[in-house]
Image: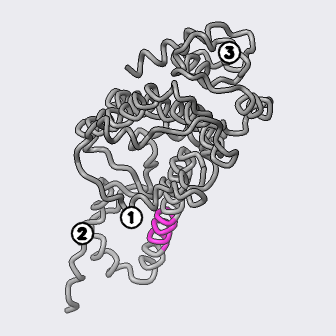
Amino acid sequence: AAAPPHPLPPAGAGTTELTGSTNLITHYNLEHAYNKFCGKKVKEKLSNFLPDLPGMIDLPGSHDNSSLRSLIEKPPICGSSFTPLTGTMLTGFRLHAGPLPEQCRLMHIQPPKKKNKHKHKQSRTQDPVPPETPSDSDHKKKKKKKEEDPERKRKKKEKKKKKNRHSPEHPGVGSSQASSSSSLR
Amino acid sequence: MSEKFDSLEEHLEKFVENIRQLGIIVSDFQPSSQTGLNQKLNFMVTGLQDIDKCRQQLHDISVPLEVFEYIDQGRNPQLYTKECLERALAKNEQVKGKIDTMKKFKSLLIQELTKVFPEDMAKYKAIRGEDPPP
């Protein structure tokens, strides 16, 4: 007589298991996520995801040694405490007066996604920085020249009124300065 | 779920804003700005402290390393999510295609074997049980 067949699981076995024959997107309730990310165009740039982040964030991190990869591969060696800077330490931060050289001014330039980018850059270099913190109301007029003032943008974001971001008529730059400085204290 | 990110997001925004204002002060420094500068330098320390405190709430969050590649290239990290979902769906369809083809093949094979070896196939079906309907 022939040997019995190699013991196999019953033919119905495996049909209750999850396999690729099931729509796994539906199974794991990811339809909403799929429609959100794949149903419409997702913008390419990092600045589209983080529109309020200052600086040239669309440049590769390798250019200015700001990559996350380098942070993971070579974590900085530091202590575990956060000690405020004492008076003695702060003497190291006594700066010379006057403007920085042009090449050092990059960090607060906004990403180039607005029409009046060049005007914005020029206004930053021409307008002197107020001697006090941005909460000083005496320098409202100088601040008002900057139509794309990030202080204004921050206020907009707080009010969630993105439509008014580019409006030159938007009032209350002084009040935005006050609100931002009060939140920092 | 998103509430635990709100606190971290708020602290990060304040920290970034503080740095940005520091940059403005420093870009054209005046001696009368020194006090404000010192204040902002110390806010950097307390700001980092606040961000560090957020860690406890987020200890169970994992971030895939691949998304860092997108960020390092200045690309929107949502593209990573999009591409993951697209790849998952494509693979799902590919595997479903294979499973369906294998099922058809099995059905045809049993059909043809039954024609050639009816007694053996009868024994086989008795041992294996009926296949569920496709």
Whichever of callouts 1 and 2 sits on the residue coming sooner in the sequence is 2
Which mark lies nearer to you, 3 or 2? 3
Amino acid type shown at disc 3: Asn
Q: Does residue A91 appear to the left or right of A65 in the view shown?
A: left
Residue matched to label 1: A74
Local crowd size for mark 1, using a 10 Å CA cut-off: few (<14), some (14–19), many (≥20): few
Q: Does residue B9 appear to the left or right of A39 in the view shown?
A: left
Q: Looking at this view, is B71 or B82 the one in front?
A: B71
Whichever of callouts 3 and 2 sits on the residue coming sooner in the sequence is 2
Q: What element does badge 1 sit on? A: loop
Residue matched to label 3: A164
Residue matched to label 2: A9
Q: Looking at this view, is B41 or B56 the one in front?
A: B41
Q: Which residues are magenta?
A: B98-108
The numbered mark 2 sits on a residue in which chain? A
Amino acid type shown at disc 1: Lys
The numbered mark 3 sits on a residue in which chain? A
Q: What element does badge 3 sit on? A: helix
Q: Chief secondary structure of the magenta span?
A: helix
Q: Is residue A121 magenta?
A: no
The numbered mark 1 sits on a residue in which chain? A
Alpha carbons under labels 1 and 3: distance apart: 42 Å
Q: Is residue A140 above or below residue B36?
A: above
Q: Position of residue A172 (x, y in %)?
A: 62, 8
Q: Position of residue A10 (x, y in %)?
A: 25, 66
Q: Does residue B94 appear to the left or right of A105 in the view shown?
A: left
Q: Is residue B102 magenta?
A: yes
| Quarter residue B46 falls in | top left
